[in-house]
Amino acid sequence: MKGGLLLALCAILVFHLASGCPDICTCQTSSRTVDCSFRGLLEIPNHLPLQTQMLYLQGNQIRAINHTSFTYVASLRILDLSNNSISRVPPYAFHFLRSLQVLNLTNNLIYHLESQVFTPLMALKELDLSYNNLSALPESLGNNTRNLTFLGVRNNQLQNIDRMVLQTFTNLKVLLARSNPWQCNCPALGLKLWLENFLYKGGTIDELICSGPSIRKGNDLLKIPYEMFKTCTPPMTAPPVMSNIHYHSPEHRSNSKFGHHNDHIDGSHPECEPKPKPRPVSLRHAIATVVITGVVCGIVCLMMLAAAIYGCAYAAIMAKYHRELKEVERLAPVAEHGSPEEKEPLDGTLA
């Protein structure tokens, strides 16, 4: 009898977990959506329907994520935790969310992320960490999030992002990184090369404005000439030739829904100071220079040939003119006085 009662209680509890909805939230069974946004919550509700696929918790006062907060919602695909007061994310906070595709953590107080925090999220496609206090991204961020297509890190405290971290995002299409204190010194060369290659492959980014060193403050990292980095240690691979690449800033989705060893800062580091060395010439520039030089030389040769022909013609005309002039001058006295034969008959007649 007691065993049957215990079994019934367990069944009721499982049914409640599977179909119950927290009183403070709104649940839609057809769309498997739970909306707990802007409800003044201090923590994530414990009892959420098992079939939940979309969970909205934005606009509350949640300060912490427990490692068991999402244990019973393994089917979750969209999770919005934006506009809360979260300062830390435990290493295994999302351990059970292997189907999660969209994660929004914007407008929180997160200053550090553990290296394995996103490791279980192999299906993740969109990750927005904008408007936090992050000064670095985990080195293993992209190890298991290779399907990521959107990454937002706007308005944080990032000074640089390791190129090796970004290279793991093989499917990334959009990177939003504006309004960070980017340090455009030698370590930023790797980031610059990655960004140019990313754009070359069709990716979209917004502008990365330098906060230092002082000689580059206010400049866009992508528009800084390579001669400014020529004294830095060269990267392992050379950048592709990309003279006609343009980039633009996409419209950022709203916060309430989805989609949303350094050198001296003052620029005194000697390795990054510009020096009077010739800039390496790319193949495209070399070919263009040869073509332009050939065209100019051809025009000059044609002009010289035309001048020579004109000079020869002018000299011939002048020589002929002088010959004719001398002939006229020679014949002029004879015509004026006449020849001796013509004078004798005239004298005889007069006699």
Image (cartoon, rainbow, N blue to C red):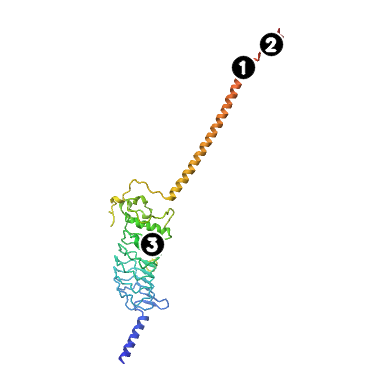
Residue visible at 57% across and 29% down in the picture: 316
User: Compared to 96, does 276 lie above or below?
Assistant: above
Residue 243 badge:
none
Measure the alpha-carbon separation of dots 3 and 2.
Answer: 117 Å
Location of residue 289 with respect to 100 vertically, above or below: above
Vertical order, 9 against 271 (above or below): below
- What's the distance in space between the residues labelled 3 and 1, CA to CA? 100 Å
Q: Amino acid at mark 1?
A: Pro
Q: Residue at x 53, y 34 (%)?
A: 308
For the question of whether residue 154 can be seen, the reply is no
Identify the element where label 3 is drawn.
strand
Q: Under tag 1, what secondary structure?
A: helix
Which amino acid type corresponds to the residue marked 3 in the rendered image?
Leu
Q: Position of residue 31 (x, y in %)?
A: 42, 76
Tag 2 residue: 344
User: Which numbered disc, 3 or 2, marks the residue closer to the eye?
Assistant: 2
| Quadrant showing the N terminus | bottom left
Q: Is residue 201 left or right of residue 43?
A: right
User: Which residue position holds label 3?
Assistant: 175
